[in-house]
Amino acid sequence: MLMGHEKIEILHLPTPLEHLKNVSADLGVDVYCKRDDLTNLATGGNKLRKLEYFLKDALDQGATMLITEGGAQTNHGRLTAAVATKYGLKCAIVTADEYPGEISANLLLDGMLGCPVYFVKDMETGRQAVIDKYTNEGEKVYYVPMGGSNEIGMLGYMECAIELDKQARELGIEDASVYVTVGSMGTYLGMLLGFKECGSSLKLVGINVLPYDGEGTDEENLLSALWDYYLKVSKFYDKDFGVTPEDFIIETHYIHGAYNNAVAEVRDVMYYLARKEAIIIDPCYTGKTFEAVYDKAKSGAIAPGSKVIFMHTGGLPGIYTKHHRVELEKELMQYMHTDEF
Ligand SMILES: Cc1ncc(COP(=O)(O)O)c(C=O)c1O
């Protein structure tokens, strides 16, 4: 139980912290991977830790249905649907994206889980219309915010940080830098607060994968959004976690201009990690974060001999999204030997 909030235990925790021997030998940096992709529902991913807390809150409130939102390929939507199914609740996903023309990637899994996906023209009115529809049908709706990133959802990653700190101490790598993806920010902020809570010496580096709206640069906009989120959390729990803006170590260099775009450099590191360690990362989130690790190790920005923990937060279905798959197929066709023998 964290911050006075209980959760429903869904996951088999702790997730493994693995040493990547082949990558470490190649990069000259000791690289470890925290396998939060191996969480145990519907192909796994980071949102499940947040959903353990949302589920408890929803059931306490007598909810019969979870409704959430995100992009058409939302991993968070798929995992919300998974948790709802498992615990006897209805679920619906709302997206303001256009229907991509085929049921692939997460959409396919949403359908398999029996979860309707509403493609709406405008998120504000569309979300409300979907909530009203189900409320009028007698459901008690619990709304889970995009990415599960609010005061409740981030508890899942506070807990993960405490778990990781313990594992790192056991392995004698408590001076490592932890590289984690920043999307809707809950994973990063939760981990930062978790490390503060347990007095960890692990250093957290957030790799941002999408531009944030605002007047400034990508970095300024993200820092300001993170600070606002932190203030909200601090007010909600009436607690000063001792965080200052200087605690936020983030990078915006790996956005490559847009969210979920197809990027050759990201695919290159996806192939690299698959071929060195048989670990599959995704083109939208974890690929960009691992690109940062790879890039910095190669350039010496991560000093030779130092220790890095790469947070694998899941996202596997993303490789089957149409615009990524097209590029992957082009590059991987050379492995298909159709007329040699
Ligand atoms: C696979 C994956 N990794 C990382 C993230 C980022 O987590 P957060 O939204 O908490 O910043 C997401 C968010 O959707 C995700 O799906």
Image (spheres, rainbow, N blue to C red):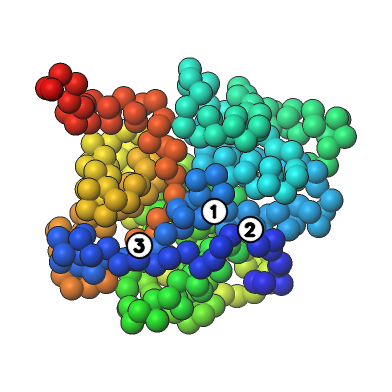
Mark sitting earlier along the chain (2/3): 2
- Determine the CA span between mark 2 and mark 3: 22 Å
Q: Is mark 3 within 8 Å of ligand 1?
A: no
Q: Which residue is mark 3?
A: 33
Q: Which residue is mark 2?
A: 10
> Mark 1 and 2 residues: CB-CB less than 8 Å, in contact?
yes
- Identified by mark 1, the residue type is Asn
Of the two numbered discs 2 and 3 in the rendering, the one whose residue sits closer to the viewer: 2
Mark sitting earlier along the chain (1/3): 3
- Determine the CA span between mark 1 and mark 3: 17 Å
Q: Is residue 165 left or right of residue 238?
A: left
Determine the secondary structure under disc 3: strand
**Percent position of residue 110, x then y:** 58, 33
**Percent position of residue 88, x then y:** 75, 45
Q: Which residue is mark 1?
A: 40
Q: Quadrant of residue 305?
A: bottom left
**Percent position of residue 228, x then y:** 56, 57
- Identified by mark 2, the residue type is Ile
Give the vertical position of 73 relative to 224 (above or below): above
Determine the secondary structure under disc 1: loop
- How many other residues sit within 10 Å of disc 1, few (<14), some (14-19) or many (≥20)? some
- Determine the CA span between mark 1 and mark 2: 8 Å
